[in-house]
Image (tube, rainbow, N blue to C red):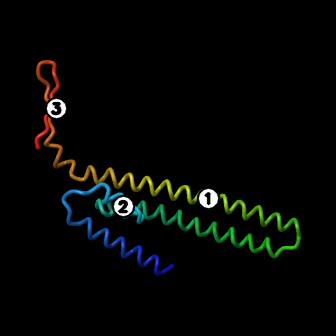
């Protein structure tokens, strides 16, 4: 477990270093970094968003570990129990823990997709302020003209 956390931190530091020197961001690269919780947001230099994404993902992962351990605990208790009523009670608690674990996995997937989408959009809009001056909208004689300067 400690080695996993260590490698995740190393990967996050690499993402921080890679995102710092670029003038424009690549959306697919930002989305790829989103495999690591908050990686796409760090790449786009949106550190507050990265903290929120890391916090939410850490909470959901912690919940998943907790519900998995609860399921295993009640499964072992049910296997050892000879009293039928207690055994059914333990099996009901195991089923409840399994359903909560399944919900945790769904929420992790949803937040991962949202974080990747956010990183993708932020990378597209990274240099928006610089490029905004290139587009002009003109109105002349009941016509609308959209001008883009390369």
SS for tag 1?
helix
- Res. 119 image quadrant: bottom left
Mark before the other along the chain sequence, 1 or 2: 2
Circle 1 is placed at which residue position?
102
Circle 2 is placed at which residue position?
32
State left or right for residue 54 relative to residue 147: right
- Res. 143 image quadrant: top left
Residue under the point 39% across and 74% down: 9
Nearer to us: label 1 or label 2: 2
Q: Which quadrant of the figure contains the C terminus?
A: top left
Nearer to us: label 2 or label 3: 2
The correct choice, above or below, for 93 with respect to 139 in the image is below
Q: Position of residue 123 (x, y in %)?
A: 28, 54
State yes or no: discs 1 and 3 in contact (Cβ < 8 Å): no
State yes or no: discs 2 and 3 in contact (Cβ < 8 Å): no
The correct choice, above or below, for 13 with respect to 119 in the image is below
- Whole-angstrom CA distance, mark 1 to mark 2, is 25 Å
Residue under the point 32% across and 56% down: 28
Residue at the limit of the structure toward the bottom, as seen here: 3
State left or right for residue 91 relative to residue 117: right
Mark before the other along the chain sequence, 1 or 3: 1
Circle 3 is placed at which residue position?
146
Residue under the point 37% across and 52% down: 118
Q: Position of residue 49 (x, y in %)?
A: 37, 58
Would you call the spot at circle 1 few (<14 residues within 10 Å), some (14-19), or many (20 or more)? Answer: some
Would you call the spot at circle 3 few (<14 residues within 10 Å), some (14-19), or many (20 or more)? Answer: few
Number of numbered tags placed on the structure image: 3
Residue under the point 48% across and 63% down: 57
């Amino acid at each position: 477990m400690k080695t996993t956390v260590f490698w995740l931190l190393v990967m996050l530091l690499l993402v921080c270093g890679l995102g710092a020197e670029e003038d424009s961001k690549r959306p697919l690269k930002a989305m790829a970094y989103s495999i690591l919780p908050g990686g796409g947001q760090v790449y786009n230099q949106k550190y507050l968003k990265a903290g929120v994404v890391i916090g939410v993902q850490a909470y959901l992962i912690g919940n998943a570990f907790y519900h998995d351990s609860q399921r295993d605990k009640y499964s072992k208790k049910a296997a050892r129990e000879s009293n039928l009523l207690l055994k059914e009670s333990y099996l009901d608690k195991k089923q409840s823990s399994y359903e909560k674990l399944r919900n945790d996995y769904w929420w992790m997937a949803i937040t991962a997709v949202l974080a990747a989408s956010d990183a993708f959009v932020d990378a597209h809009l990274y240099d928006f302020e610089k490029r905004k001056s290139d587009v002009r909208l003109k109105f002349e004689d009941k016509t609308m003209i959209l001008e883009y300067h390369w």
